[in-house]
Amino acid sequence: MSDPAVDASRPGAVPASPAGLALDRLADHLATHRPELAGPLRAQLIAGGKSNLTYLLRLGDREVVLRRPPLGHVLATAHDMAREFRVISALAPTEVPVPGALLLCTDPEVIGAPFYLMERMPGEVFRTRAQTDPLGDERRRALAMAMMDTLAALHSVDPTSVGLADFGRPEGYLARQVRRWAGQLDRSRSRPLPGIDELRDLLAATAPEGANAGRIVHGDYRLDNLLASADPVAVHAVLDWEMATLGDPLADLGLLLTYWDVLGGSDTAAGNPVADGLGPRAGFPTGSELIDRYAGRSDVDVGPLHWHVALGCFKLAVICEGIHYRHTLGQTLGEGFDRIGEMVAPLVAHGLTAARER
């Protein structure tokens, strides 16, 4: 999912910019605010449409990454560039691997939306079976366990020690998550969605207190939000912090299990850009093995996770419906988005089953 690189060398005429990026204004902004990054500028879309748009910028001999919100229909409070920039800046001195934060611009007039720049990190985003099948069982297992070790490291960071004491409101986090995603659902409805309102109501009526509240929560933690290597196995950076906050780490585990076992264990995921390379179906360990690994490296009481899996199903169903809606409006960049809408119904069905567990 990429566009051909385009050149914005200065001075002189600037060629057409890639979708979602005004290269001429970006070059001017860098010349004023980060002159060491100014100079011949080339840009390439490297991930687009499902979430924030990500571009590789070539600034002479240097490569950096730019992140901006998706085009068109953007849900309120989502895709917060300042939030992403703040959390990766705060986590830089910790054991959690993050890209170096370079520049934040909240002025939408520069490229058409707020954005930030970060260092380009080594590694690969493992997203598809074409990438994960050649790894073999041993390296797939090692990669999955490294993913869980990294999540345990994140949840062990004291927010106050890294300047994130006010990064969220831990009290009532889980009930607030239900309300937030219910609101996002209402802003993304474009077709009948049987069962989703019942799932919302069940979650709202049974939200636990959240005994682990107050940890840094990623909000969308999964294998393909990591930059990793398989030889040797290592996690080089955690990406996509747009939904990070202070809350209950079990929400991260529940959503991870949703990706891993619900989607990654189902034929629904075959060829789908959200979960094709994840989970047992792709030859990785089961979700219960991942939770065991996490529990052995964290002081978080994992307890029963069925409610958190139900929340993960609801949240991911709403996200997929939002992507489906943007796709119907022609506002996604890349391939595979015609199938995202198919994932909503099985997510709702599994969420209802999990929410009814006792």
Image (tube, helix red, strand yellow):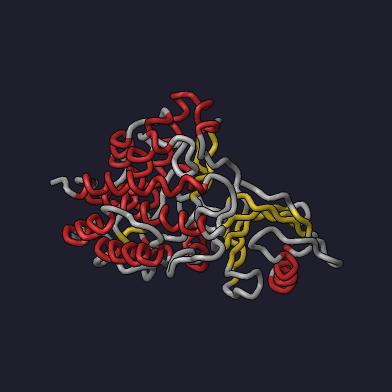
Q: 246 or 57: nearer the eye?
A: 57
Residue 104 relative to residue 94: left or right: right
Q: Residue at x 30, y 46 (%)?
A: 298
Instruction: From this view, report whether residue 18 is shown above or below residue 274.
Output: below
Residue 270 relative to residue 199: left or right: right
The answer to whether residue 232 shows anywhere in this view is no
Q: Residue at x 54, y 63 (%)?
A: 69
Q: Residue at x 57, y 69 (%)?
A: 114
Q: 309 or 32: nearer the eye?
A: 309
Q: 319 or 31: nearer the eye?
A: 319
Please give the count of numbered marks on the rendered protein.
Answer: 0
Where is residue 167? Give x, y as percent.
39, 68
Q: Residue at x 76, y 59 (%)?
A: 41
Instruction: From this view, report whether residue 90 is shown above or below residue 97.
Output: below
Residue 26 relative to residue 98: left or right: right
Instruction: From this view, report whether residue 1 is shown above or below residue 21.
Output: above
Where is residue 89? Give x, y as percent.
51, 62
Q: 14 or 208: nearer the eye?
A: 14
Quadrant of the image occupied by residue 281: top left
Where is residue 272? Give x, y as percent.
47, 40
Where is residue 284? Give x, y as percent.
40, 30
The answer to whether residue 5 shows anywhere in this view is yes
Instruction: From this view, report whether residue 295 is shown above or below residue 163.
Output: above
